[in-house]
Every structure is written in structure tokens, then in C-alpha cells.
Image (cartoon, helix red, strand yellow):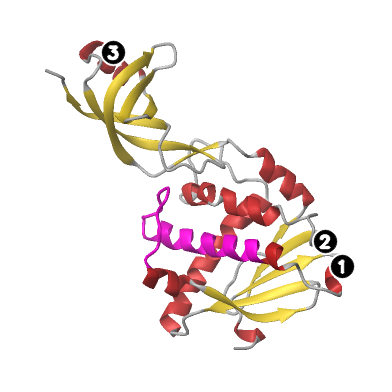
Amino acid sequence: MNEEESLLWLRFIGEDLNIKSLPIYELGTVLIAFQQIINKAYLFEKQSLTKGAKLSPSEREKCALQIGAHRKSSDEYGFITFVTDPVVIDHVKTLVVDAVFALGVYASGKAVSKNEKEPNNQYFIGSIYNQVTVINDRIENIGGVESIEIRGGNGVEVEKVSFTTETQSYVRQLENETFLGEMQEIKGSITKLYPNRLIAEIKIAPAYYTKVFLNENDFDVVRYKTKTGDVIKFTGRPIYRLGQKTAKIREFEGVSIVDIENEF
């Protein structure tokens, strides 16, 4: 493989990096973070991106990137696929486009949508927050990195992404901002009601409680037609917080009540 075949270029910029390379730990954490973003892009494409979801060994191999080129300008790395099958390469190109686009949303300061209509990939964008933090934390760390650039290579048309100290500050301020997960169902027994906030707390499993945010009509159904211990199934979307690592759903935006199993 040569430089012309690289699908993606990652450049660490800093005065010291014109004469030496990034320390192994600093480089390694970024490479792992970017591979994790590619893997999440694959899961999102398959509609399988959930907290804690993992790729099979075969899927990991097909999504895997490797270093194909290295330039001293400051310190730049070109990436190629691990599997050389043309079909796999074309597929990985689409994942790289999705990954770089999502990274660009953070770089542009628009990672959390405040509009009523969210972009279709808002869940994917939110899911990579921890990886984006890892990449941005390399700036002004021990490696002498002043900024980081990510750009497309062979057959990958994307706008160049630049992470700077301003981006780093913005990303850190996002911690605990919320974003919605994919539509799904959850069920549990009612343990507590918060009438002033239209919230029903349910117990999903031992030591696993979730607050379900409801509309006024559904809250009245829960309030007046159920009792403590009844099991209720809701459809809706998990509410995640950027930086949250647990796979458990602690907050849930309830869209409708699916079923009520009354306790006898």
C-alpha cells in the first residue's frame, strides 16, 4: 500500500512534531478511539447501535483500519483497511464518511440539536462523545499537539475537520447534555409518581430504576388506573447523557403506554 491508497488522514499539528513523533500512548488512544467510532458507524448502519453493543470477530476484522502511511508534516498518518477485498474497502469508505461527518459536527459546535426535529444521525453523534473527548484531550497534552486535523483520502469526499483548543473547551462543556436513543419498549413495576413533573418511576430489575417522562394523558392513566406493583410497558426513546457510560436506561421519554399488567 502507498500514500495514494489511504482512505483517511489524521494529522497532529505542533511545532515539536515537525522533528519528532507523537508519544505511543497519545497516538494509541486516538487510534483506538477512531476505530471505535468506525465500529459504531457500522452498528448504527445496521440499526444495532445500543449501549454496550459489540461487533463479532468477523465484523471487527472487516471494519478494521491499519496505518498505511506516515508523514512528518507535523505528524500525519494515513489509514487503509485491514481487509483488502474491494467490496470491504468500499463499505469502509462509507463508514469513514459517516465518522468524519459526525466528528465535524463536534468541530463546528453543533453536536447537540436543540431543534424539535433532530437529524437522523443524532443518536450516532451522541454515542461517540467519549471517543471525541479522548481525541480532543490530546491537544496541549504531553505530546505537544496544538491542533488535530482529519481529512478524507482516496475516494472519500468529506470536509476537513479541525480540532483546536476552542473545540476542546466546547466538547468538555457538553458533558451531561442529553440526547435521545432509538425507539424501543421498556417495562417495569411502578414504584413512585411525580405529578408535578409527569414522571413515573419504574423498577426494571433489582437496583435498576428508570424515570419515564410522560404526556399528561398517559400520566393520568398511570396515576388513576394502576397501583404500586403493577407492571407497565412503555414505548419511547431512552434519554442518554453525553459521557454516560452505563448501558442502563435511567431516563426514558415515554411516547405511549403499550400494556398494563395488573397485580393480583
> Which secondary structure dominates the residues rendered in magenta?
helix
Query: Residue shown at 73%/62% (left/top)?
Result: 148
**Element marked by disc 2:** loop
The residue stretch that appears in magenta: 28-56
Residue type (three-letter) at the residue carrying disc 3: Arg
Q: Residues within 10 Å of mark 1 (few under 14, many from 20)?
A: some
Residue ID for mark 3: 223
The extreme left residue here reads 264
In the rendered structure, the answer to whether residue 72 lies left or right of residue 251 reads: right
In the rendered structure, the answer to whether residue 165 lies left or right of residue 66 reads: right
Q: Nearer the viewer, mark 2 or mark 3?
A: 2
Q: Are marks 1 and 2 in contact (CB under 8 Å)?
A: yes
Residue type (three-letter) at the residue carrying disc 2: Gly
Q: Position of residue 96 (x, y in %)?
A: 54, 67
**Element marked by disc 3:** helix
Q: Residues within 10 Å of mark 3 (few under 14, many from 20)?
A: some
In this view, the residue in front, 145 or 166, is 145
Residue type (three-letter) at the residue carrying disc 1: Asp
Residue ID for mark 1: 16
In the rendered structure, the answer to whether residue 256 lies left or right of residue 146 reads: left
Residue ID for mark 2: 144
Q: Position of residue 218 (x, y in %)?
A: 30, 21
Q: Tell me which numbered mark, 1 or 2, is placed earlier along the sequence.
A: 1
Query: Residue shown at 33%/31% (left/top)?
Result: 255
Q: Is residue 241 above or below residue 157?
A: above
Alpha carbon of mark 2 to alpha carbon of mark 3: how far? 58 Å
